[in-house]
Amino acid sequence: MSADQPFGYPYVFMEYLGGRTLPTGLARAIPHQYHDKVAKQFARVFTELQNLTFSRIGRIWCGEDADQPVEIIPVAWHSSPGPLESSFEYFYNERQNDNREIIAMHPDDPDWLTACWVLKTALTHMVIEDRVRGPFPLCHLDLHFGNMLFDNEYNLTGIIDWSSAQAAPLEQLSVYPEFATFPVLSDEENRPIVELKNLVVESIRETE
């Protein structure tokens, strides 16, 4: 990355990964006959990530040359950089930061204020109790169709852009943009997304 070398310009050598990104969400871009195959591949990815665990929440650092012991360091872009010891702290600080921004934009709106209270109160119901203090799995945090590579037979050949990856709560690992339905679409239009999600969940259960 430094220009202070014989070539004179910053550069990075990267291993080439075959495959291509898809033009839109996976449930629509991938033909239906391949959904079961793709679901099984996703299940393996989630299982592998779930099994790569750490004792604290934060970014993973192995030194400038990736030759040092693994260390958990702060997450600069998070509302509570950490490293953190509990999932509740992670979600509480994130929610409070969002609530402060919302209240600043809608200081006298009872609907927004009520929504902030509901979201804050809901935290205790969404946290997995026996995983509050870890272990915390590796999370990609940006796992959407633009960061996955497939060949012509829809074999998953690689996952790219790990720049936001970190050790995070297990709940965060389950947040996957490709499974999000769209309120403006009908149930029929959202059906491919729901069905692909169900196939992935079923495949994960089969691997456990």
Image (tube, helix red, strand yellow):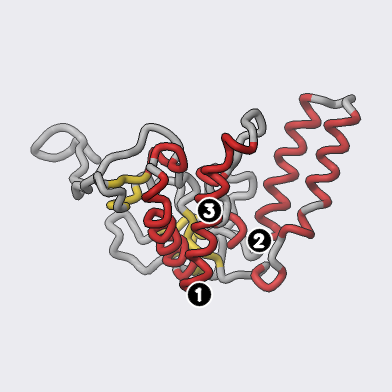
Disc on res. 26: none
Q: State the image quarter where residue 104 is shown.
A: top right
Amino acid type, residue under disc 3 in the picture: Pro
Q: What residue is rendered at 91% in x and 30% in y?
A: 110
Q: Nearer the viewer, residue 121 or 12?
A: 121
Residue 139: horizontal and vertical position, in percent? 49, 56
Q: Earlier in the sequence, mark 3 or mark 1?
A: 3
Q: Left or right of 208: which side holds 118?
A: right
Residue lying furthest left? 6
Q: What residue is rendered at 80% in x and 31% in y?
A: 103
Q: Residues within 10 Å of mark 2 (few under 14, many from 20)?
A: many
Q: Which label lies toward us, 3 or 1?
A: 1
Residue 164: horizontal and vertical position, in percent? 46, 47
The residues bearing labels 1 and 2 have C-alpha atoms spaced at a distance of: 23 Å
Amino acid type, residue under disc 1 in the picture: Glu
Q: What residue is rendered at 89% in x and 25% in y?
A: 108
Q: Earlier in the sequence, mark 1 or mark 2?
A: 2
Q: Nearer the viewer, residue 187 or 171?
A: 187
Q: Label 3: which residue?
A: 74
Q: State the image quarter where residue 77 is shown.
A: top right
Q: Label 1: which residue?
A: 208
Q: Is residue 75 above or below residue 170?
A: above
Q: What residue is rendered at 62% in x and 31% in y?
A: 185
The residues bearing labels 3 and 1 have C-alpha atoms spaced at a distance of: 32 Å
Residue 204: horizontal and vertical position, in percent? 50, 66
- CB under 8 Å between discs 3 and 2: no
Residue 193: horizontal and vertical position, in percent? 53, 44
Q: Earlier in the sequence, mark 3 or mark 2?
A: 3
Disc on res. 87: 2
Amino acid type, residue under disc 2 in the picture: Ser
Secondary structure beneath label 3? loop
